[in-house]
């Protein structure tokens, strides 16, 4: 599959492209530390989102606790001044014997797809951290962008509608990440360009996994919700933004 084959459905799904003003800001060398830092945090937050879905909707207690322990070192480093993550040790942290399980076919599909997503997002987290270390970029805490909060305001407050909307929001976040990786890559130095292009396939699959799960769990046609949340996502991307972040809008 070519890069264009990977990107085509993503671009059709999103309601707008990344504005050139954001790309111009992101490509500035002085903004690279902030860009990489926020990218690393976004990878962890994507893993946390998947974990929360498993724990809230399908996980047994033992499996849920195992997943919490899996993410704990990453969260400690990122949010609580914990030690640098031990890559070799963390890669062995989770095994099938402690995975959540359920007899519900949809629930098992959620577990399998979200656990794979968690593994890949944590791997990307460590990859970004390695890039930062190689470039002598220290990790400094930053504030969160308004993007995810803005999307989650669209989530309905009753079930199963809330679950459907959360899954659609997850799809848009993953699709936007994929689109931005591709939009930014040509403006970066060769190693970074190669790194960002290497992420496209997994991010594209993640958005499709979220949509598939949303369609499977809903008893109604979800296209109106996909459209409504997509329009909200585009408004966030096209609106002026006072803070530059990986998913921010047009730099104010």
Image: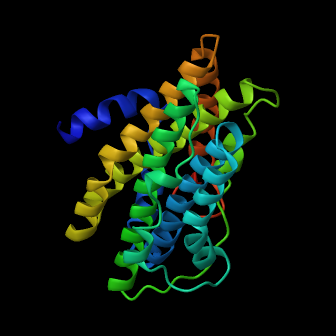
x%, y% of residue 93? 47, 67
Question: In this image, 46 relative to 145: left or right?
Answer: left
Q: Farthest left residue? A: 2
x%, y% of residue 206? 43, 40
Does 246 sit above or below residue 11? below
Q: Nearer the viewer, residue 46 or 88?
A: 88
x%, y% of residue 224? 62, 16
x%, y% of residue 156? 77, 29
Question: In this image, 182 relative to 34: left or right?
Answer: left
Q: Nearer the viewer, residue 248 or 75?
A: 75
Occupied quadrant, residue 13:
top left
Residue 20 visible in the snapshot = yes
Q: Residue at x 65, y 53 (%)?
A: 62
Q: Farthest front residue? A: 97
Q: Residue at x 52, y 50 (%)?
A: 99
Q: Residue at x 58, y 82 (%)?
A: 140
Q: Farthest right residue? A: 157
Question: In this image, 148 relative to 171: left or right?
Answer: right
Q: Farthest top residue? A: 220
Figure quadrant of the C terminus: bottom right
Q: Residue at x 53, y 54 (%)?
A: 98
Does 226 sit above or below residue 186? above
- Describe the colour scheme in one phrase: rainbow
Q: Nearer the viewer, residue 77 or 132?
A: 77
Figure quadrant of the N terminus: top left
Occupied quadrant, residue 80:
bottom right
Occupied quadrant, residue 151:
top right
Residue 252 visible in the snapshot = no
Give the mark count.
Answer: 0
């Amino acid at each position: 599959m070519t890069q264009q084959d990977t990107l085509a459905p993503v671009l059709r799904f999103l309601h707008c492209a990344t504005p050139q003003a954001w790309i111009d800001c992101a490509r500035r060398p002085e903004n690279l530390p902030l860009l990489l830092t926020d990218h690393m945090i976004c990878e962890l937050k994507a893993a946390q989102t998947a974990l929360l879905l498993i724990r809230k909707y399908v996980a047994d207690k033992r499996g849920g606790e195992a997943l919490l322990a899996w993410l704990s070192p990453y969260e400690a480093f990122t949010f609580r001044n914990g030690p640098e993550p031990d890559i070799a040790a963390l890669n062995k942290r989770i095994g099938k014997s402690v995975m959540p399980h359920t007899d519900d076919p949809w629930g098992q599909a959620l577990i399998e797809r979200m656990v794979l997503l968690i593994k890949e997002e944590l791997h990307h987290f460590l990859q970004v951290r390695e890039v930062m270390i190689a470039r002598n970029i220290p990790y400094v805490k930053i504030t969160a962008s308004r993007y995810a909060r803005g999307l989650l305001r669209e989530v309905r407050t009753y079930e199963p509608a809330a679950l459907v909307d959360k899954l659609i929001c997850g799809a848009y976040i993953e699709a936007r990440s994929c689109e931005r990786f591709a939009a930014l890559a040509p403006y970066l130095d060769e190693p970074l360009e190669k790194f960002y292009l290497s992420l496209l396939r997994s991010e594209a699959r993640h958005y499709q996994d979220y949509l598939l799960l949303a369609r499977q769990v809903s008893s109604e046609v979800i296209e109106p919700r996909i459209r409504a949340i997509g329009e909200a996502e585009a408004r966030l991307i096209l609106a002026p933004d006072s803070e530059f972040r990986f998913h921010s809008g047009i730099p104010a």
